[in-house]
Image: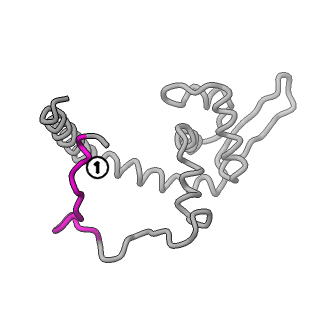
């Protein structure tokens, strides 16, 4: 256990206290919990980027690959769009040309997801200052604890 994790954690009080009833909970076995489905679908690095880019419209494979920030390998993009296609979020159309032309687009189900992705992105932007402050406070406390422990 690290020096920063030796204190007893207490439940927050006041404005930061949780609501009487959680907004979401998993009382069912994990395989039946919707949170697992979400994490299985979007817990990887690339799926959300693919959904965001396809929200703008139909894209060919290389166009999609170029639009994804940070760069994605051809293999990883192939794996990602296949998973999204299997889940019914992306439609793949192959045109019989030489070489074959392949286009990807969001299905109706995929488009319904974009509102949730936008809400998460908005939350992230709205809370950036609070998250940065929390990280700075945590890092400062961890450094102080390490110094006190003689590390």
Q: Is 149 left or right of 94, judged from the image as shown?
A: left
Q: Residues within 10 Å of mark 1 (few under 14, many from 20)?
A: few
Q: Residue at x 34, y 52 (%)?
A: 123
Q: Is 98 left or right of 59, judged from the image as shown?
A: right
Helix, strand, or loop for circle 1? helix
Q: Is 48 left or right of 94, judged from the image as shown?
A: left
Q: Is 21 left or right of 91, judged from the image as shown?
A: left
In the rendered image, the quadrant that contains the C terminus is top left
Residue toward you, 35 or 62: 35
Question: Taking 127 as reference, is 71 above or below it?
Answer: above
Q: Residue furthest bottom?
A: 20
Q: Is residue 13 magenta?
A: yes
In the rendered image, the quadrant that contains the N terminus is top left
Q: Which residues are magenta?
A: 3-18
Q: Residue at x 58, y 39 (%)?
A: 50
Classified by dominant secondary structure, the portion drawn in magenta counts as loop
**Residue 68 at what x, y percent from top left?**
53, 31
**Residue 97 at what x, y percent from top left?**
85, 27
Residue toward you, 17 or 129: 17
Task: Report the residue marked by disc 1.
Answer: 126
């Amino acid at each position: 256990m690290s020096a920063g994790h030796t204190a007893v954690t207490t439940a927050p009080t006041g404005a930061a206290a949780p609501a009487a009833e959680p907004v979401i909970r998993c009382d069912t076995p994990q395989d039946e919990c919707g949170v697992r489905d979400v994490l299985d679908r979007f817990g990887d690095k690339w799926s959300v980027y693919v959904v965001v880019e396809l929200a703008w419209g139909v894209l060919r494979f290389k166009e999609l690959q170029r639009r994804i920030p940070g760069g994605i390998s051809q293999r990883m993009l192939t794996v990602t769009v296949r998973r999204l296609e299997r889940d019914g979020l992306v439609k793949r159309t192959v045109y019989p040309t030489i070489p074959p032309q392949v286009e990807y687009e969001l299905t109706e189900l995929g488009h319904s997801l974009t509102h949730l992705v936008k809400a998460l992105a908005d939350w992230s932007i709205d809370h950036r200052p609070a998250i940065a402050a929390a990280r700075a406070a945590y890092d400062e406390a961890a450094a102080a604890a390490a110094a006190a422990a003689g590390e």
